[in-house]
Image (cartoon, rainbow, N blue to C red):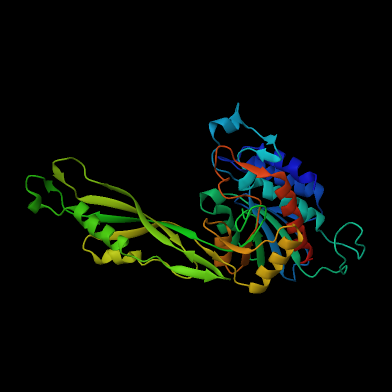
Amino acid sequence: MDDVPELTRELVSIPSHEDETAAGDFIERWLREETDGEVTRDEAGSVFARTGDPTGPTLALVGHHDVVPPAEEQTKSGEYIVEERDGRLYGRGTADMKGAVAAAMCAFRDSEVPRTSDSSSGSRPRDAAPAGELVFVSFVGEESGGIGARHAIESGFAPEYAVVCEGSTNYSKQGVTDVVVAHKGRRGSTITARGTASHASEPEAGENAIYRASEAVDIVRGIDAPTATVLGNHLSGSVAVTEIEGGSAMNVIPDRCTVTVDERTVPGERAPIERVTELEGVEWAVDQDLPPMACSNDGFAERMLAAAREAQDGVSELVSKPHATDAGWLAEAGTACVVCGASEPGEAHTRNESVSLAVLDRCYRLYREAGEGFI
């Protein structure tokens, strides 16, 4: 699809690591000019476009237009650099995930109703009356804990089905875009141990908060992280202490010590870190909880797998993903989700981030195949 590379270039060139407004403006304007869909913008800044019959089932093509801060070599005079080399586009946001957003935008445009039974355009024949609704959405704040997705869900956004266009390429094998049916989440938490300060020459006069924190760390080390299996894919969670801070001076018994815990969660169960609160003077608080995802509808997963295989020569598979996405928030709210997109392992958030132009075309065809099955 010739439009996708150029649209990707334009999107990537718009800085959106501090303020997503300009990128959202561009997406909204393009959708209004290039499609006949109903285009809206919510209070958070996320952009929506709808077509088809809202009384039928809804499929959402889901992306986000915020990015992480660029590396120094990815900008020049405050502008993002976009370069094409060896069949790939390089620049901040190419893989995560403006390339897939561009592919989904073009697929939404080209999947719109009304359609006729004439299949000369390359789309498959269908009845003129739509069977359901197709929605394109690009959220804000995905990199900041799903701000846009959470706002939309709280405001009533509840599609029955969603394709979240994050990376799924080269997961089962090289040269294939797969269909992710489950991914891990992340729960970050803080253990706070409190004691009583005293002079270090008389340690018995105080209660050492570091010692209490050490007991809590021992409990964390002994926890077996949960596991889950989703459509044949086995996910193993993990729990790790990643930071510890305590004490005020070398001659003072510390009255406070904090421990940071990174937990990778799986669908259905969490590690029982709250056990640490059974210790005297120890508290536990969750700082961030990005939910895991498991596709709740086997038929939808198989349908998307068929669309993925139709869009490429390689045989794609149902796979899992180690990273959290907005699919976690949607799945938690009741949407049947899969993740399917152009980004490859190791591309997102890197200094040489890039996306394959051939894979973007593949994703366009995949998203269009999926969309045309709903309207």
Can residue 290 be seen in the rendering of this structure? Answer: no
Q: Is residue 74 above or below residue 174?
A: above
In x, y percent, where is residue 276?
A: 28, 63
In x, y percent, where is residue 209?
A: 20, 53
Residue 52 placement: quadrant: bottom right
Closer to the camera in the image, 291 or 344? 344
Q: Is residue 358 above or below residue 222?
A: above
- The residue under the point 81% across, 58% down is 112
Q: Quadrant of the C terminus?
A: bottom right
Count of numbered badges drawn on the protein: 0
- The residue under the point 91% across, 64% down is 116
Q: Is residue 124 above or below residue 70?
A: below
In x, y percent, where is residue 145?
A: 51, 53
Residue 42 vs residue 244: left or right?
A: right
Closer to the camera in the image, 277 or 298? 298
- The residue under the point 56% across, 51% down is 142
Closer to the camera in the image, 122 or 316? 316
Residue 123 vs residue 364: left or right?
A: right
